[in-house]
Amino acid sequence: MFIREEKMTTFTKTEYMAKKFSDKQMHILDVAEELIAQKGFEGTSVRDISTKANINVAMISYYFGSKEKMMASLYQYRVLKTRENFSEFADTIKNGKPEMQMKEMIKYIVNQLFKYNYFHGFVTQELRHTESLKDELMEFYQLFVRKLDEVIKKGVTTGVFTFTPKAEDLLTTVIGSTLFVIRNKNFYELYVPHKDAESYQKEAEKKVKMNLLMSVFALLGYASE
């Protein structure tokens, strides 16, 4: 784990991604992600992907082996991209007040989970037998924990936060609560005013963010001025 993280620091994010995927693979995965986001995994065929990517159908098998294996690669690709984007995002707000940083990181995590909600059912199945996905996800979670921990300590040191909950517990609360809502739409939509699927997604995300911000800041012992 630590060796892998040390190696990653010697490459730019583009170089690191290039070590994982070829340009052609990344092109196919970008197209596949766009289609799956629109039509779902089951509703997207290999032919749909190959047609939009302007490649022969056989190239999917050549590069990935199968549609299911391509989806595993797509998940890994998405985790890597989101991890890199989060690192850049965290750097842009690192000089801000602890309460602002905490708020923005929670909103970021919830937003990403809702935005890529079509992965979650698939990921649960794949993680049972795919070590590479477990490793990528582990490093992804650890990055969030490190950043959250830095903000918690900064807040306590400056007197903004009263309590010091464990960063991994805060991350568990944020991810667990968000995934519960995503996976139980039939239940949660009873409590979210909406007109259609798009408005539900927007309002559900807003409600989750609001509730998590209240819960997390209470755990931190923060009281706004």
Image: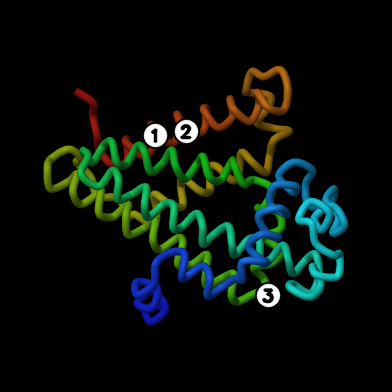
- In the image, what residue type sits under mark 1? Leu
Earlier sequence position, callout 1 versus callout 3: 3
Please tell me which residue is depicted at 41% across the width and 41% down the height of the picture: 106
The answer to whether 201 appears left or right of 4 in the picture is right
Measured as percent of width and height from the top left, residue 143 is found at 39, 61
Which residue is the site of mark 3?
129
Which residue is the site of mark 1?
213
Count how many numbered circles sit on residues in the image: 3
The answer to whether 150 appears left or right of 70 in the picture is left
Query: Would you call the spot at circle 2 few (<14 residues within 10 Å), some (14-19), or many (20 or more)?
Result: many
Which residue is the site of mark 2?
209
User: Pointers 2 and 1 in contact (CB under 8 A)?
Assistant: yes
Q: In the rendered image of this protein, does residue 40 appear above or below residue 200? A: below
Measured as percent of width and height from the top left, residue 149 is found at 28, 55
Marks 2 and 1, how far apart at CA: 6 Å
Q: In the rendered image of this protein, does residue 70 appear above or below residue 45? A: below
In terms of secondary structure, where does tag 2 sit? helix
In terms of secondary structure, where does tag 1 sit? helix
- In the image, what residue type sits under mark 2? Lys
User: Pointers 1 and 3 in contact (CB under 8 A)?
Assistant: no
